[in-house]
Image (cartoon, coloured by chain):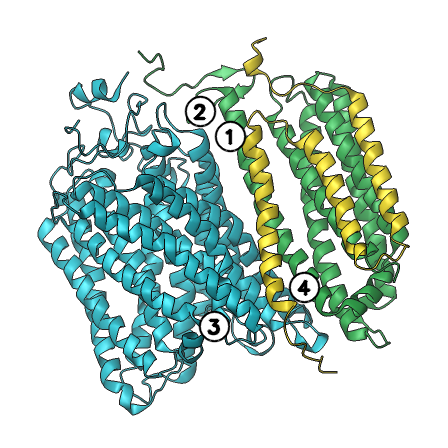
Chain colours: A green, B yellow, C cyan
Amino acid sequence: MNTRTLEPQHFKSPAGEVEKQFDNPLQQRDTATIGMWVFMATEIMFFGVLFAAYLILRSLHPAGFAEASRDTDLLLGSIETAVLLVSSITIMIGIRAVRLEQRRIGVAFLGLTVLLGCGFLLIHGLEYRADYFKHLIPGIDYHQSGPYWKVKELFYCMYYFITGFHSLHLFIGICVNAGMTIRVARGSYGEHDYTALELAGLYWHLVDMVWIFVFPLLYLIGRSG
Amino acid sequence: MNDPSRQGPKIKPISLYVWVLVGLQVLLLIAIGTSFVNLGVFNIVIRLAIAVTSVMLLMVFFMHESRARALTIMTSALGFIWLALLVGLSLTDFLVRIPVPPPW
Amino acid sequence: MSTMDTLTLPPPAVDSYLDHDNTLWAWLTTHDHKRIAILYTIGITFFFVLGGIAAAMIRLDLLEPSGLLDPETYNKSFTFHGVVMVWFFLIPSIPATLGNFLLPLMIGARDMAFPRINLASWYLYMIGGLFTAAALVWGGVDTGWTFYTPYSTMFSNTNVYLVIVGVFVTGFSTIFTGINFLVTTHSLRTPGMTWFRLPLFVWAMYAVSLVMVLATPVLAMTLALIGLERGMGVGVFDPALGGDPLLFQHLFWFYSHPAVYIMILPAMGLVSEVISCFARRRIFGYKFMTWSMLAIAVIGFMVWGHHMFVAGMSVYAGMVFSLLSFIVAVPSAIKVFNWTSTLHKGDISFESPMLYVLGFVGLFTMGGLTGLMLAAPALDVPLTDTYFVIAHFHYVMVGGSVMAYMGGIHFWWPKVTGRLYPEGPAKFSAILMFVGFNLTFFPQYILGYDGMPRRYHSYAPQFQTLNVLSSAGASILALSYLLPLLYLVWSLRYGHKAGNNPWQARGLEWQTTSPPPENNFRHPPVVRNAYAYDEPAP
């Protein structure tokens, strides 16, 4: 005899309310996680279009792209990468602290993650600003000379599409995490209720992972040519 | 609430986080350092190898904490495989096309 | 508690999902997958009518060799027809309506995994539709549904932005539906519902969701690139910079060919359910059916280049894509063979859903076989952009998907509404649809083979007879779409009560009441088998 009740269970558990379509909190948690992973696969395809276009165009114009990528700012790019990598760790430490009910440490590290994300955007803004003064922004202000000036414009189109789209995602991640930080500070989430935090963490890692590919592809390849 | 099946993944020691961070930063330094050495074709190979290693570090240690491990690993691989399809099959065109000189 | 126990209980007096909260606000904020499916049905029917009107304009223009409409209007008509029918009717048609309604019922779940995202997907669909309709009101768009560059980025002076935004937004609704279906199938199956007991319709939804989730982002991003290029005046598809318009075609067809499978895979699953029910037989080669659907979903991603044989792609790539296109025909053929084998020695009854579905099998086979002709570059070169191509994909899309969709609507109508539609008119309109469809599109095979190109508002005089035949067929087809609208709406009020299982079908969805209660089942069902038509009716 199946002991499951006839009507859907609306029960409160320490892990928050279980929606009617789920049998227990664990199923709900796993389902949310799988959903997030599928969503991230779509995100990979979103960025994938840009990467594919970049790689294909690069294969058509290797010399011009190499020269253009030498004009990117290696120092700022490296700092940005380092900042993002650190933020990926701080968010994990923050979530870990929340799970251990060390609420103040959690708020501190989640807040630090948000600050690091903002720092990334700020440094990237500086890069864009420098580009503007070097007349490197296609469609707005682009004046270059040299044999590859046309192909370089193509490179900078890709550069702005990819980094712009990445910054947009990072901005969304910052908003989500800022909200999470506030909620943790107000006493939400804890030992058994941290699925939302974990999903936000996954998203943050995804944005980080994208940058891990952006940095070498845009800044590093062609540096030595 | 001590039933293990109701709990999430194990909480990991903080030292693990620090070591992964160190690993990621070292990989970054290697990437920047080697970018000044001209390795020809291997430029892109080594670049991508380092990037993939970094991503694997993140994925292995931090992202697969769900109980549904096999499924999430499959799902996370899916995006990358499909991206490879897109790039790979497109390149069957672009790599063997008769080059058309640019109009300038 | 076993299913047998459930079914020996007296007919339960449970309130159905339609019985309470029937204010407009309650419907617009519902999280119930069944109600969302009905919202989707209303939206889709609306856009089907819009797209149908555009099609009527096309057929009207082509009555005369010189064209009855002016060229701009004609261009805008076929563009609007394509955009609306592809993104606002065919792609969401079966998954978002029948799929949304049936998937949780078929796996014994109480709802989708993410009900709020499900509702959000409907809103995104409607917002996207609003943008597209706005483009029409503003004067239309003339790029063709494919938005080929550089025309769409540099030259067209029409409302490309509005349509691109509309399709972009709708893309997210497709992605949300896909995520929901995948996760629901993984997480919410009732006890005993193992992977190889899933109804083939659920497998079809699973396969199609894979395609939706992995292909749609590519379309969205590619359209975003078009928008940026139009806005900034520079971009990656611009040959003046060394960019490549063919890159657009690669990216576009990487989505749009799998999109064809988004349209046909659900139909394949649906047809398997109906055939099995009305042949009173277990579906033949169940595992082959599941694997072939997954194979179609995966291989469908590797064949997009066959749209570009004459576009300037390398010949080597043409050979690769041609070979892969032939390979994808294999799983499709497996499905046709298995349907016919299911019919073999079956106890067949020709109810109206069965008529629609049998029409599907024949028309899909014709569409598929002519597809093989087009997959061969040698034959494709002269046939590209002729009416042969039009006829080919309408046989698959309209003769295939729409016929199946209509069959599915009839098959599950008693479950959705609790009422039976009148069988006579239904049979009549099923036959009318088959006749009208063939009269519309078979002449186009001949026209195309004789060399009439697509997308022109005028044509050579020798093509007139066949064009008039085709237009005449289109009016019959239109009538056959109107008829069901009338008698189905009529049956909502005057139809006979359906009972829980009017077809004596074996799927889980037939074991609950018609219409189902809000939480789908009074008792969580337990499943012991699938397609048990060789066992006595439960």
How many other residues sit within 10 Å of disc 3, few (<14), some (14-19) or many (≥20)?
many
What is the x, y in percent for residue A75? 90, 51
Mark 4: few, some, or many residues within 10 Å (few <14, many ≥20)? many
Could you tell me if the residues under marks 1 and 2 are in contact, i.e. CB atoms within 8 Å? yes
Residue B54 is at least partly visible in this image = yes
CA–CA distance between discs 4 and 2? 45 Å
Q: Quadrant of the C terminus of chain A?
A: bottom right
Left or right of C262 on screen, residue C220 = right
Quarter holding residue C79:
bottom left
Secondary structure type for disc 1: helix
Chain under disc 2: A
Earlier residue among tags 4 and 1: 1
Alpha carbon distance from label 3 to label 2: 46 Å
Residue A60, percent across and down? 71, 69
Q: Earlier in the sequence, mark 1 or mark 2?
A: 2
Query: Which residue type carries mark 3?
Result: Val
Task: Examine the rendered structure and indicate whether residue C487 appears above or below residue C16.
Answer: below
At label 1, counting other C-alpha atoms closer than 10 Å, the crowd grade (few under 14, some 14-19, many 20 or more) is many
Give amino acid for label 2. Answer: Phe
Residue under disc 1 on the same chain as residue under disc 2: yes
Residue C398 drawn above or below residue C189:
below
Please state the chain letter of the residue tagged with numbered disc 4 in the rendered image: A
Q: In this rendering, would A2 be left or right of B88?
A: left
Disc number placed over residue A56 in the picture, else none: 4
Residue under circle 1?
A31
A135 or C210: nearer the viewer = C210
As drawn, B32 above or below B68: below
